[in-house]
Image: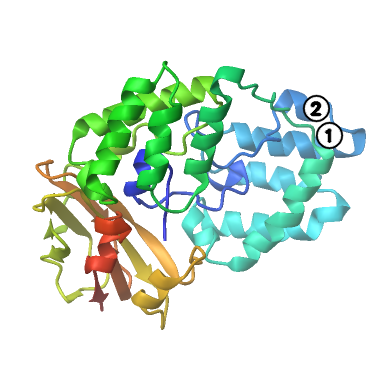
Amino acid sequence: MPTTTRSRRVKAVAALCAFGLLAVACGDDDDTDAAADDTSTTVAEAEGADGEFAEYCTAVAEMEESEGFDAAQFERIRDAAPDEISEEIDYVVDAFIEAEGDMGKVFTDPRVEEELGPIEDFEAEHCPGEEDEEFVVAAEYEEWCGFMEELDSQDGPPTNEQMERVKEIAPDTVREDAVFVADKFIAANGDVGQVFTDPAVEEAFGRMEDHDAEHCGIETEENEEEDDEQATEPLDGAAVVDVTAVDFAFEGIPETLPAGADVSFSFTNGGEVAHEMFMARLGEGVVLDDLLAMEEEPSEEQAQDIGGVFGAPGDETVYLNAEDLEPGTYAVVCFIPGPEGKSHHELGMKTTFTVA
């Protein structure tokens, strides 16, 4: 199930193009780098590749810099594919062309991911890429930046002891915000949902993230327009299911919904702390409690993300819009940590419904 960093750790929404293997998997977007790795190749660089691989590297680079799906570009990659990866390229290109740009459909086939591995390895070795300059942290920020990296890399929310250290080592450039946020976490005693009932916390987090991007080189994973992407209107013609979050349950979710329907799940937070509604279609035979108990991230076969929305108490209603629901069992979960560090779903904020 999903996790993110910092303030977005409490907003577990579905991530598009989760595999992040090649830019061609999502289409290039000037605002998103999730699908490109540190050796992303520009056309100009690719043209300087070793002679025998220059045509292939250039074709891949042009695909990465293009927008949307283009079957002709895939065919060019196939034609230029070196012998070392020609079989893998054939399989992947056929999968993308058959899906006609539907990336979700492409990755229903686990072999696609398997074949992409050797392709990426080949390109890393033979296609020139951009070299990232190592970020140098000034001595005055070393302790702070190191601790922020530690907090960002851990699975759970920060402990009270960690928040006390934040207050102790915060540099003057971010001390006011750091102390404010730390005090909020300590007062909540692990109930992250309570922390985010105060919009000033989110604002302080934003300033801290900007600070750490500048002084620590820490890149944030969330989409800066994430809040704006939460739908404020239902789909045209969709059935509307009114869902209310309370402490700690979802009210209004029916036991069954018809297959093939377009459904807009309205989400209103009627509780006293922040809540989210994350939805996934469970794989055949998968039990929700077993899935939640897993330490590793579930596979696409175990849980297919439908989406997620977030709301603090008093926020306006938002919509999780789902088109053409497929038959199966669907899970609805709130992952936000609550009192004593227990996730809201551990306190009962989870349920399932059936589409048939």
Whether residue 330 is situated above or below residue 119 in the rendered picture: below
Relative to the observer, which residue lies in front, 281 or 323? 281
Quadrant where the image shows the C terminus: bottom left
* Residue 309, percent from left and from top: 26, 49
258 on left or right of 224: left
Q: What is the distance, in whole Å, between disc 1 and disc 2 at their CAs?
A: 6 Å
Q: Which of marks 1 and 2 is nearer the N terminus?
A: 2
Quadrant containing the N terminus is bottom left
**Which residue is disc 2 drawn over?**
47
- Location of mark 1 (residue): 54
Whether 350 is drawn above or below 328: the answer is above
Left or right, 144 with reference to 181 = right
Kindly state the secondary structure of the residue where label 2 is placed.
Answer: loop
Relative to the observer, which residue lies in front, 61 or 344? Answer: 344
Residue 97 visible in image = yes
Q: Quadrant of residue 312?
A: top left
> Callout 1: few (<14), some (14-19), or many (20+) C-alpha neighbours within 10 Å?
some
Residue in the picture at 77% in, 37% down: 57
Q: Is residue 276 left or right of residue 328?
A: left
Type of the residue with mark 1 = Ala
Marks 1 & 2, CB-CB < 8 Å contact: yes
* SS state under label 1: helix
Residue 138 in view: no
Q: How many labels does the image show?
A: 2
Residue 305: x %, y % from top left:
39, 60
Q: Local crowd at mark 2 within 10 Å, few (<14), some, or many (≥20)?
A: many
Percent from the top left, x then y, of residue 88?
A: 75, 59
350 to the left or right of 106: left
Q: Residue furthest bottom?
A: 285
